[in-house]
Amino acid sequence: MCRDIARPRGLATKLLRAAEAAIGPGRLFVSTEADNSAVLALLQRESWMFAGSVEGVNWVEGVNWNDIAEQFFFKDIEAAGKM
């Protein structure tokens, strides 16, 4: 999560791209709460695909303490130099 002051600097984008590069080729998954508009916009800009969501489960069962749906996304990362 980036604070509002960091958003114009693209720190979240840089962190996401660095994670993609560090992990390397394969299918990566990430999740965020359904009301996190900043992360949802970032994932859309960076071509992550929606994979599904978990709703109606409270934090006691292991999802979100505030009962907001958790949305999951994936991205296929190719090996460097491969098109």
Image (tube, rainbow, N blue to C red):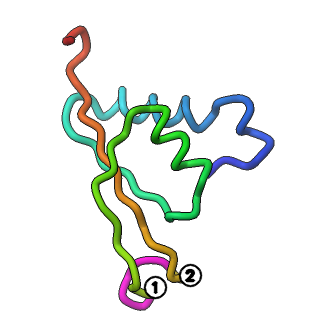
Left or right of 51, for residue 61: right
Q: Earlier in the sequence, mark 1 or mark 2?
A: 1
The x, y position of residue 75, in whole percent, is: 29, 38
The x, y position of residue 35, in whole percent, is: 57, 63
Outermost residue toward the top? Answer: 81
Numbered mark located on residue 59 in the image = 1
Q: Residue at x 41, y 57 (%)?
A: 31
SS state under label 2: loop
Per the image, is 65 magenta? no
Disc 1 to disc 2, how far (Cα)?
Answer: 7 Å
Q: Eyeballing the image, is 25 above or below 29?
A: above
Q: Nearer the viewer, residue 31 or 34?
A: 34
The x, y position of residue 25, in whole percent, is: 21, 29
Badge 2: residue crowd in 10 Å (few <14, some 14–19, many ≥20): few
Outermost residue toward the right? Answer: 5
Q: Amino acid at mark 1?
A: Trp
Q: Amino acid at mark 2?
A: Asn
Q: Which residues are magenta?
A: 59-64
Q: Residue at x 47, y 59 (%)?
A: 32
Q: Nearer the viewer, residue 13 or 34?
A: 34
What residue does disc 2 label? Answer: 66
Left or right of 17, for residue 81: left
